[in-house]
């Protein structure tokens, strides 16, 4: 665990140390690993701690109607629109300490850096910690960023977790009301942009020797549920040539998914991450298999083409092996390009800090930024993580990289300020 710096000042070291502090009970709902689900006891304790840190950094802190923590650093003028910096504070079960949380801590450190220098902007800066990005409690993800972006749509909020606790009851425990959940929505005129710093959750930056990267887009994603239906039978008496083995067919289908995913451009990925076999008995030929298929790419057309190829390949296998196949689309997330102007500012900021041309890459993982893009232009900064490991206790970052990220974030905000006049209007590059 990283020790806190002796001097209380904005730093990457402090950001890492605070993430470590929040990785244990009472900030986790589990005693022996990190699990911080939305609206759980660990979430409540975490919001209290973050609110204190926001206040120390010079912000006012509040919890919005959806359970997000929001800190506001006022601008030179009251009621000025805000530049939002944020990420999520929830975690998957047995997750890592830096996924999401590091972006929130870097937001606080960024504000603290300017507050220590007494610098105010023609806009406010708000740091937001979204309560539910992972969907690790209720059967939806990015619920609270969707509330802030005003894109809940026809989402049914009559949700319940695995223990039967409803969203309404969980909100009530936080002093919040389900009927006012949508009140977390922000007005477009009040938000200038949204910026998110996040660990890469992949190995590219580390493999290529980059501490930081600039995200050009968040990948389009399809998620399918595949059900293969064969004929169950006794493993000792059913002749091989007469079998309709659902698992053998599914295994061939999984290899087809892998082959098609690997035949496309670098940012195309296709994954089977879950499989259930029935009846699941050692001496019975499997009669039914259900598995997931996740297809992602930085460009929607690439994802769509790969998904079509997968569908055709699986249908061919099903026909040849005389098994049934039911393929159902469960999730369709379009590609989210980051704003070109903001990404240029971020690239310039990274260049200022590292002295090198920044690595630009597509995020294969989903982020709150893809939802916030419905509200305002977005930009993302990636930090390398050790081994590309995420959603795992072995998740790790280097303090020097986090310090570089903090410096890039402050450089970005400074450059962003130069694109705005005190009147809040956009300045052209010539005017800058």
Image (cartoon, helix red, strand yellow):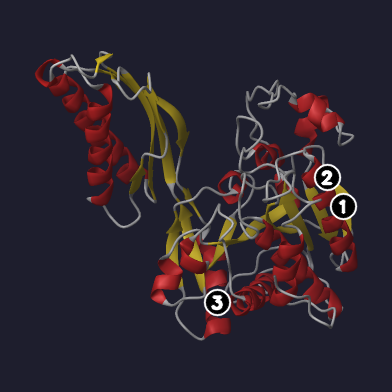
Dot 1 crowding, Cα within 10 Å, few <14, some 14–19, many 20+: some
Which residue occupies the foreground of this view, 113 or 174? 174
Residue 424 visible:
no
Q: Is residue 209 above or below residue 246?
A: below
Identify the residue at horizontal 80%, vertical 52% (top origin).
46
Identify the residue at horizontal 59%, vertical 75% (top origin).
398
| Residue 217 on image: x %, y % | 46, 55
Q: Is residue 317 above or below residue 341?
A: above
Which residue occupies the foreground of this view, 244 or 10? 244
Q: Is residue 292 above or below residue 236?
A: below
Residues at marks 2 and 1 touching, judged by CB atoms closer than 8 Å = yes
- Find the residue positioned furthest to the left: 241
User: How many numbered marks, from 0 up?
Assistant: 3
Foreground mark, 3 or 2, reads 2
Residues at marks 3 and 1 touching, judged by CB atoms closer than 8 Å = no
Identify the residue at horizontal 65%, vertical 71% (top origin).
409
Q: Is residue 248 above or below residue 241?
A: below
Element assignment for label 3: helix
**Location of the C terminus (image quadrant):** bottom right
Residues at marks 3 and 2 touching, judged by CB atoms closer than 8 Å = no
The residue labelled by disc 3 is: 350
Residue 241 visible:
yes
Identify the image quadrant of residue 360: bottom left
Identify the image quadrant of residue 260: top left
The residue labelled by disc 2 is: 44
Separation of disc 3 and disc 2 at Cα? 35 Å
Dot 3 crowding, Cα within 10 Å, few <14, some 14–19, many 20+: many
The residue labelled by disc 1 is: 48
Separation of disc 3 and disc 1 at Cα? 32 Å
Identify the residue at horizontal 69%, vertical 50% (top origin).
32
């Amino acid at each position: 665990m990283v020790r806190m710096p002796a001097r209380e000042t904005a730093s990457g070291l402090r950001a890492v140390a605070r993430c470590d502090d929040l990785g244990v009970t009472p900030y986790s709902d589990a005693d022996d690993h990190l699990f911080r689900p939305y609206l759980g006891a660990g979430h409540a304790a975490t919001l209290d701690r973050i609110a204190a840190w926001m206040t120390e950094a010079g912000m006012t802190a509040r919890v919005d109607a959806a359970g997000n923590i929001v800190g506001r650093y006022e601008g030179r003028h009251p009621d000025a629109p805000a530049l939002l910096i944020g990420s999520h504070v929830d975690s998957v079960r047995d997750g890592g300490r830096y996924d999401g949380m590091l972006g929130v801590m870097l937001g606080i450190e960024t504000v603290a850096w300017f507050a220590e220098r007494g610098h105010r902007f023609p806009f406010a800066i708000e740091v937001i910690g979204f309560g539910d990005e992972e969907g690790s409690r209720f059967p939806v993800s990015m619920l609270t960023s969707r509330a802030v972006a005003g894109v809940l749509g026809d989402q049914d909020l009559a949700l319940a977790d695995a223990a039967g606790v409803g969203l309404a009851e969980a909100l009530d425990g936080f002093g919040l009301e389900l009927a006012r959940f949508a009140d977390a929505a922000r007005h477009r005129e009040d938000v200038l942009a949204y910026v998110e710093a996040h660990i890469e959750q992949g190995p590219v930056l580390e493999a290529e020797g980059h501490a930081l990267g600039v995200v050009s887009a968040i990948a389009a994603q399809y998620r399918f549920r595949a059900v293969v239906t064969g004929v169950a039978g006794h493993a000792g008496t059913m002749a091989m040539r007469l079998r309709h083995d659902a698992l053998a067919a599914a295994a061939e289908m999984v290899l087809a998914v892998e082959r098609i995913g690997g035949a496309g451009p670098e940012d195309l990925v296709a994954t089977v991450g879950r499989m259930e076999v029935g009846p699941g008995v050692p001496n019975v030929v499997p009669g039914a298999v259900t598995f997931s298929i996740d297809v992602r790419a930085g460009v929607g057309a690439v994802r769509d083409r790969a998904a079509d190829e997968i569908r055709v390949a699986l249908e061919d296998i099903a026909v040849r092996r005389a098994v049934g196949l039911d393929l159902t689309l469960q999730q369709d997330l379009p590609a989210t390009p980051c704003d070109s102007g903001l990404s240029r500012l971020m690239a310039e900021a990274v260049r200022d800090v590292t002295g090198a041309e920044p690595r630009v890459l597509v995020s294969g993982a989903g982020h709150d930024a893809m939802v916030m893009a419905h509200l305002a232009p977005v930009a993302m900064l990636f930090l390398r993580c050790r081994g590309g490991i995420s959603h795992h206790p072995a998740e790790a970052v280097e303090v020097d990289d986090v310090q570089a990220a903090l410096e890039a974030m402050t450089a970005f905000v400074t450059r962003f300020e130069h694109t705005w006049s005190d009147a809040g209007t956009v300045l052209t590059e010539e005017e800058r």
